[in-house]
Image (tube, grey):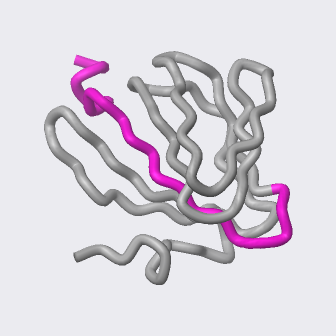
Amino acid sequence: MTRLLSDAPYCAESFGRRALVDEEHLLLMQIALLPGQEVPLHKANSNVHLIVLQGEVQVILDGVANQVGTGNLLPVAFGTPMRIRNDGAGNSTFLVVKTPHPRVMEG
């Protein structure tokens, strides 16, 4: 059993992350952001869905800002430039669902 909230991978030095499922056709990651932390600008390396478990994050997709809060799901198309930041006063954690696995997209 994995505890998504009580064991969220927060890290003081940079954003926290852990793989929850790493299979051929699915990569499921958990990202944890303390206030002010961010996932730097990068391109989606698969078809991605972000599911916010706690808090709120600003997700910038191809230059367009989206506020995504607890209980919301945001789809991100393959190849989309994205940056994710916790601009709030509280902690934020979210799931990143990548399907197919990025290894399949590269191959």
> x, y (%) of residue 45?
43, 26
Which residue corresponds to the image point at 42% horizontal and 71% vertical from the top-left? 4
Q: Quick one: which residue is furthest to the bottom in this view?
A: 6
In this view, 48 is above or below 53: above
- Quarter in which the N terminus is drawn: bottom left
The front one of 54 and 16 is 54
Instruction: Examine the structure image and report whether residue 16 is included in the region drawn in magenta.
Output: no
At horizontal 40% and vertical 62% (from top left) the residue drawn is 18
**Which residue corresponds to the image point at 67% horizontal and 72% vertical from the top-left?**
13
Rendering coords of residue 88 (x, y %)? 83, 62
Quarter that holds the C terminus: top left
At x 76%, y 41%, the residue is 67
- Where is residue 9 drawn, in percent x and y? 49, 72
Q: Is residue 69 above or below residue 35?
A: above
Please tell me which residue lies in front, 1 or 14: 1
Side of 57 relative to 93 (left or right): right
Residue interval drawn in magenta: 87-107
